[in-house]
Structure formats: C-alpha cells, structure tokens
Amino acid sequence: MTDWEKLLEALAEVDEDIDFANECALIDDGVIDSLTLTQIIAAINDAFGVRIVTGDLEPENFNSAQAMLKLVYRYQERK
Amino acid sequence: MSILSFEFLLFIAVIFCVYYVLPTGVRWLALLIGSAFFVFLSGWQSVLHLGAIVLGTWLGGLALERVKRKRGLLCLLLILEFGALILVKQDTSRAAPLGLSYFTFQSAGLLMDVYRGKVKAQRNVWKVMLFVGYFLQLSQGPISSWKDLGEQLLEGHPLRPVSFVSGFQLMLWGYFKKMVLADRLAAATAVLTQETGALPGWMAAGGVLLYTVRLYADFSGGMDVVRGISRMLGIELPENFRRPFFALSVAEYWRRWHITLGGWFRQYLLYPLTISKMGLKFGKAASRWLGKKTGRAMPTAVTTFLVFLLIGIWHTFSWNAVIYGAYFGLLMAASILLDPLWKKMNRRWKLGQKRWMYPWRLVRTWLLIFPAQFFAFTESTAQSLAVIRQCFAGWSFSGAVDKLTGIMSAKEWGIAGMAFVILMLVDILCEAGFAPCERLAKSRIWVRWPILLLLLLGICVFGIYGPAGDSSAFLYTQF
C-alpha cells in the first residue's frame, strides 16, 4: 500500500462523507471543523507515527490530502 | 474615555487628521500616541498594568528567540500574565484596568506565536505597545493575532474613499444598535434583578429573552463602532459576531458569538491540549474501550468542556459563570461524542437536505441556548434560580399592558420594537447573502447619503443619553 493510499484510508476512517482525494480547500471552504481536524491529526499519528505540533496547524497544511502528505514527509525527514 | 462620548468623537477626528497628514511610513505613530493618551486617561492602574504587560511581551518575545529552555520561559511568562489577570479580577473592590482581559489575551497570543516560530519577536517596544494596547480594540476586543492586526497597524494606509464610507456606515450602525436598542432595553431587563417575586412567568422569561437581545445589540454594536472607525483608518479588525441568532446548532452559535474569544481558546488551548502527547495517548486508550471514532473524539470532548468552563469563569469568578460554562461545555462535549451517530442518521435519512429541518434546527438551537441565559444576566445564582422559578409561577396576562407600560412608556416600547425589526431585517439580508452594508457603501451618492443621514438622525433623536450626555457603559468592558 502506498503512503497516499494509507493516508486516504486513515482519512476515510475519520469521515467517509468527505472526498479527501479531490477536495483542495478543506479548511478554507469549512469542509472540516476543529473536531475533524483534531481527529485527522490522531489518525495521521496512528498511521504514520508522526505527531504534528500546534505550530503546523495552518490551513495550507490541511487544505488537501496532498498537503497533509507533504507535511507527514516533512516530519519523517526531520526524524 | 467612553467610545460613546462626545469627547471620543473629537479625539477620533484629531486622530484621523494626524494619521492622514503624516507620511505613510510613520502613520502608526499617530495610533501609538492616540493609544497612549487613551490608556493614560483611563487611570494609573491601566498605565501600570498595560506597561508591565508590554515590557513583558517585548522582553519575553526577544528572550524566547534566544534561550534554550523555551517552554519553561513561556510557561513562566504565561503564569505571570494570567496570574496578574486573576489577582486583579478577583479584587472586586477596585476597578480593573481598561481592557485587562483583551490585552492580556493579545499579548499571550503573541508570545505563543513567537514560541511556535509563527512570527518573529518584535524588536521595537513601541510597536509591541501599539499591538497590545491599540485603543480601538482595548475596551472590549476583538482579540487579534499579530498576523491579523500587528502588520496592519504598522503599515500606514492611504485614504480610500470606499473603505472610509463603509467604515463610517458601520460605525453609525454600531451606535444605532447600542444607543437606540441596547440602552433602551436596559430598563426592561432591570426588572429581572429588582422585583422578581412580583413578575408573572411570561415577564420573567421575556426579560431573559430581552436581555439576550440587549447583550447582542450592546456587544456587537460596540464591535461595529470600533471596526468601523478602524476601517476608516484602513485597518480591518476581525469580525466578532456573525448573526448568532441564525445558528443551526450550539457549536455554530459559538462560531458566530464572540468569535475571536472562541478562536483564541481554540488556537492556544484546545489544539495544544488535544494533540499533545498526552491527548493522543488518551485518545488511543479511549479507542480501545469506545471504538475508534468515539475514542478519538474523547480528547476533543474533554478539552472542549474545559475550554467552555474557562470561558464561563473568564466572565466572572462566580457560580453562575461556572454553571454557564459547564452547561455549554457539556452540550458541546455531548455533540462531539454523538457526532458519528448524527452523521450515520444523516446518511440514512438525508436529514440535512430536508427543508423542514431548517426551522426545527433553529428552534432546537434556541431551546438549548435559552436556559444558559438565565445564568448570564446576573452573578447571583439565587437570583437566577428565582427568575427560573418565576417562569413557572403562572402566566396570568391580566393587566399585562399596565405592567409593560410601568417599565417604560408605550412609545419607548414601540421604538425598541422598530429598532429590533430593523436589526433583524439587516441580519436576515446579510444571512441571505444580500450584503446590504457593502451595497450601500458602493451605491450612488443620492441613495447612500439620505439613508446614512436618516440613520444619524435616528441615533440623535432616539438614542438614549446618560446624565452627562454619555451613553451607558458597554456590558463587556467590565471583563
């Protein structure tokens, strides 16, 4: 399973109604609220073992699944 | 100096002249000197407290960029800031410094942003002072971050006629809400704290409802005034109210009511706690017992409860504030934990798309919010309980007209009613996306100015003035 698929699977577990693969303004358009955002962070932590810190809770990091994967890679590089 | 006084209008006129005469690069100095003057007039406690907070924010910010033990230093700075806030607020024998909570929140936000590396520590102490003590947001907010406000204050804006007119309009609208509606309703809501025992049920319940309207008109009116004047200077302050009476859920209500306070708590308390190591561990442990979805929501539910409890206590250190905060905290925590169930039901029956759900959701939200208002209008739990008891004491309507005209004359009721209808009409138009304020600001001069002059005349004729010609203080300046 690729990282992309792993992320989409984790995100679908959080909310299956949201089209994470294609949406690109999840925060800006209000598709995800603060509850969903904190759950996404918990799901990313479960799937990839990285703990996102509050300083990275910026819309540009969570507006799309691609942006989230980039953020995950940044954390993995730092490890 | 109250922002409703005649002196304030003169003061603003001077600020405008100096601001727009100065070269763009140093226009912020007009705001700085204006803010210093404003704080100076509000007493030595304000000068000392704000001065200490500004120095702490400036030196603390610089130190946070240099020291190794950043977290320890940040904790120390926050303990000092909030310790001072609590100490001053719990001493009710003295008046608290002007805008105490608002500048404390703003300063703490800046320090946390520097700690997180989101903004650079400001080297110029005067720039820190302007951000923390900007006179227009000092008395009752909105609470802004450095990114939202700091750079805007320092930029120096050219005079833009459309912004200037739109700001003037917003300012007038704010004065209308405060002076024509909110202050007029003060008499009607005062009966709740004076003669509870003699009130029929409908008057007690109606009084609490009117208090809610008054609070909205008062606080959002004040926000419109300061946002309007700021816009006239080219500075856009964040919105603090977005038509809360049209919320379709309690969560949405809190996204529309006192938006910047909720945003501050979300940014600087809810997120850090929920996604901390401990929060994630707690979520994993809860997932084993409650299933993944509910388990993962548990940390957010617990921290949300805590945040609302603190928002309650922030208002006053009283049992009423605890009840108010805990009530909303429990409602929000329950809605977070029931979210998966709600989504499941929605998928099955497509409830979100049904038209009849709109009025039901609106009414349901108000049925949930209304009980909390009984604990908002006074600090005394006994008083709140007495009013609740009174609501069930009997709804005799005999002599209703006399009772109402005993509070204020039929003419006054009529003016309050008209003002409320106008407020609701504007809110409905905004809600429907008609954007009446923006349209008016861009409309032709012979359409715009008669309407604005009518509004101005309405405020002058129907506004409530105190003994010295000033209007009464805003409800939220006391926090």
Image (tube, coloured by chain):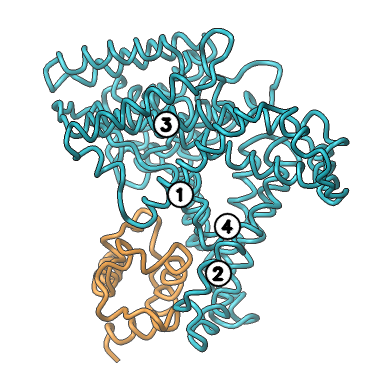
Chain colours: A orange, B cyan
- The answer to whether dots 3 and 4 both sit on one chain is yes
Residue B446 appears left or right of A78: left
Residue B37 appears left or right of B246: left
A10 is higher (above) or lower (below) than B42:
below
Q: Which residue does the numbered mark 2 point to in the structure image?
A: B281
Q: Amino acid at mark 1?
A: Arg
Q: Nearer the viewer, mark 3 or mark 4?
A: 3
- At numbered mark 4, what does the secondary structure look like: helix, strand or loop? helix
- Quick one: label 4, few (<14), some, or many (20+) residues within 10 Å? many
- At numbered mark 3, what does the secondary structure look like: helix, strand or loop? helix
Q: In this orientation, does residue B96 appear?
A: yes
Outermost bottom residue: A1
Q: Quadrant of residue B375?
A: top right
Q: Quadrant of residue B193?
A: top right
Question: In 3D space, how far apart are the residues under numbered discs 3 and 4 (Cα atoms)?
Answer: 31 Å
Q: Amino acid at mark 2?
A: Lys
B74 is higher (above) or lower (below) than A72:
above
Q: Which residue does the numbered mark 3 point to in the structure image?
A: B174
**Which is nearer the eye, B383 or B426?**
B426
Question: In 3D space, how far apart are the residues under numbered discs 1 and 3 (Cα atoms)?
Answer: 14 Å
Quarter holding the C terminus of chain B?
Answer: top right
Q: Nearer the viewer, mark 1 or mark 4?
A: 1
Which percent across, then down, holds residue B374? 72, 45
Q: Which residue does the numbered mark 4 point to in the structure image?
A: B304
Q: Which residue does the numbered mark 1 point to in the structure image?
A: B243
Among numbered discs 2 and 4, the one appearing first in the sequence = 2
- At numbered mark 1, what does the secondary structure look like: helix, strand or loop? loop
- The answer to whether dots 2 and 4 both sit on one chain is yes
Query: Going 29% across and 24% down the picture, which residue do you hit?
Result: B127
Among numbered discs 1 and 4, the one appearing first in the sequence = 1
